[in-house]
Image (cartoon, helix red, strand yellow):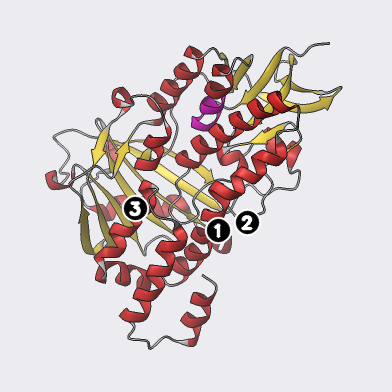
Amino acid sequence: MKPDYDVIIVGAGPGGSTAARGCARSGLKTLLIEKETFPRYKACGGCLSLKTVHLLDFDLTSVLENTIYGAKFSYCLKETFFLESKEPIAFLVMRDRFDHFLVNKAMEAGATFLEGERVTQIEEKAGRIEVELAQGRRLSAYYLIGADGAESVVAKSVVPERSLGDGLAVQSEVRFDSSLPFPDQELHFVHLDFGKIPNGYGWVFPKTHWLSIGIGGMFKETRNINPRRFLDNFLKELGYISKDRIEKIKGHLLPSFYHEGQIVSRGKILLVGDAAHLMDPLQGEGIYYAIQSGLLAAEAIIESEKRGVLPSHPYQKNITLTISENLKWALSFSRFVFKFTKLAYQTLKHYPELSHLYLQVLEGRETYQGFVASVKERIKDFMKGRLSEKIRKAMAKV
């Protein structure tokens, strides 16, 4: 019996919608399934790096909340310094509007959107893949893409023993208007604070009607901490937020990249974005890797249809070459930064060119490998070569 669809995609975040659009544009009968009803609130900083915008071949103006021209850095909300650019370095979005926009782009390309339906089970049989919905309905396809986030049902069928991830973020939304004593000179800056959050950082992202304020980190080694307490302290110490202004607080998992050989596919099942643990372990960026992997997943399935081969191998290979090889450097460097946060911060502050080099990483003009090599040299300069054995050993692993 012929399947209901050529491709079923579970999860309508940026990765799922991008994959759906790519498959539908190629003429494949594509179904995009989402457990929530859109538009829906999504706890996320919503920061689009320039390389993210460059991946998309359509105008995002209608969903952009703010254009960012710089970053404010602080250590325990002190020792502040600013990085400023004449050109935009990033854009901010609210994920409910941004994700809905991407879903509409997928539908315009011909994809069918099924919302408010939760996938509960995956089964492969007779050359096709069946998904079972919460109400018992079953749908089938030749190919399946899992874009259903950190707790992916699809991923469990590919990597049954996989971890949900070491990271956790908690974000609040504060209504942003003229009555809030927010510094006018920082309206087009993101604020990143280090030192207060174990293995992570705090952030403030100013948008049109909201300030998105949160904390996040890789808490594997510190599981007894209370992230909500860290957020409460961060909000209090910022100095311009009163409790009565906080309207939303929500936590979510950070499924960080963990190994260049991590499995992201099997046969005709491909994982993208958070479901594949494709998230920057240093600064938590996930949208770029979701969109990039969504594009690669669509390409692998289209090529599979043309050549009559399974999409798993070429997809896994392309993920390794285009994403994993870069993120493995971010992973090793993040371990150093979280262990020696003060040293890393002081080095960044002392050598402003490192900040500009990191912007090139966000733009896609520099790799993490090149950035890390420069940081290591500057740390040696900053310490005048007098590195402790502990620091020396840690740097050797980076």
Going by the numbered disc 2, the residue's amino acid type is His
Q: Which percent across, then down, holds residue 303?
A: 66, 29
User: Residue 259 — which label?
Assistant: 2
Q: Is residue 158 left or right of residue 234?
A: right
Residue with the most extreme right position: 126
Residue with the most extreme front position: 307
Crowd rating for badge 1 (residues with CA inside 10 Å; few <14, some 14–19, many 20+): many
Mark 1 or mark 2, earlier in chain: 2
Quarter of the image where one finds residue 154:
top right
On the question of residue 150 being in view, the answer is no
Magenta-tinted stretch: 13-19
Q: Quadrant of the N terminus?
A: top right
Going by the numbered disc 1, the residue's amino acid type is Lys
Mark 3 or mark 2, earlier in chain: 2
Q: Which residue is mark 3?
A: 360
Report if the CB atoms under discs 1 and 2 are less than 8 Å apart. Answer: yes
Q: Which percent across, then down, holds residue 36?
A: 54, 22
- Alpha-carbon distance for marks 1 and 2? 7 Å
**In magenta segment, residue 18:** yes
Crowd rating for badge 2 (residues with CA inside 10 Å; few <14, some 14–19, many 20+): few
Asked which secondary structure carries label 2, the reply is loop
